[in-house]
Amino acid sequence: MAATDKALAGLRQMIASGELGPGAKFPPEPELCDHLGVSRSSLREAVRSLGALGVIESRHGSGTYVSALDPAAIIGRFSLSVELIPLEGVLELLEVRRVLEAHATAAAAARQDPELAARLGAVLDQLESTTDATEIQHLDAEFHGLICAAGGNPTVTALTDVIRGRGGHYRIFEPGADFDAIKQTSDRGHRAILAAITTRDPAAAATAASAHIAQTELWLRALRPDPQPALP
């Protein structure tokens, strides 16, 4: 095992076991090196690696600490690697998103937030009235993000955000022969989701969300667009 890998494995074990819990300050560097049996350079490289994952944070003038280990925050860092996944992998991720958003949409319907339907309706009014591809993508993300947040599980929201972020590079709402059909079908799918949430029907909400995302999968498989830079 390489020295850096040994340091990384040791730190992960200390954190996973609870020896260093959320918010805990790391022991002094010489002590930690002796404990793990590694050099300072290997330890520092391991710390940088865990920092990039959101597991460790350095506080200027104070030291190195385990982060809060918030699942949503850590999952949000997945975007660094998910952003590299090609279309075939994105299609697999969309299957995961379909399951997660069906659950979140059902939960949102069950929670019966009276303000949610009004907010979603306002977003859909804007979405249905525009043909600008960039605006469509932003409003679509806002619609789905509101629903996931209303589902009450920040970790699910973070994971769907990461998946949707990469999926957004493969754009189907671009001018072309299929634009009108895609837009109209998408708008109907959104309205079906909203109707189920408005009537507080979790089963119908889950079905509508699943069908809507499945339709997106079908369009991506058929159109196979090239990846584009992220929208501002």
Image: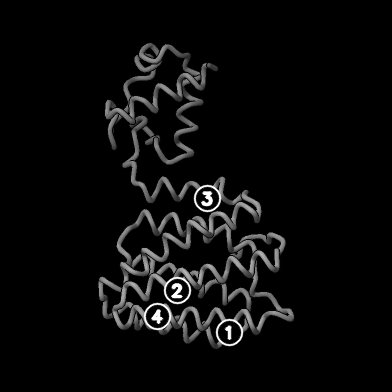
- Residue type highlighted by circle 4: Leu
Query: Which three-letter amino acid code belongs to the residue tagged 3?
Result: Ser
Label 1, label 3: how many angstroms apart (C-alpha)? 30 Å
Q: Which mark is residue 126?
A: none
Q: Residues within 10 Å of mark 2 (few under 14, many from 20)?
A: many
- The residue carrying mark 3 is 79
Label 4, on which residue?
Answer: 194
- Which element is circle 2 on? helix
Q: Residue 56 lies in what quarter of the image?
A: top left
| Earlier residue among tags 2 and 3 | 3
Helix, strand or loop at label 4? It is helix
Which SS class for mark 1? helix
Q: Which mark is residue 143?
A: 2
71 to the left or right of 127: left
Q: Closer to the N terminus: mark 1 or mark 2?
A: 2
Q: Amino acid at mark 1?
A: Gln
Q: Residue at x 26, y 80 (%)?
A: 114
Mark nearest the camera among 4 and 2 is 4
The residue nearer to you, when weighing 60 against 130, is: 130
Image coloring type: one colour
Q: Residue furthest right?
A: 177
N-terminal of the pair, mark 1 or mark 3, is 3
Determine whether the residue tagged by mark 3 lies in a helix, strand or loop: helix
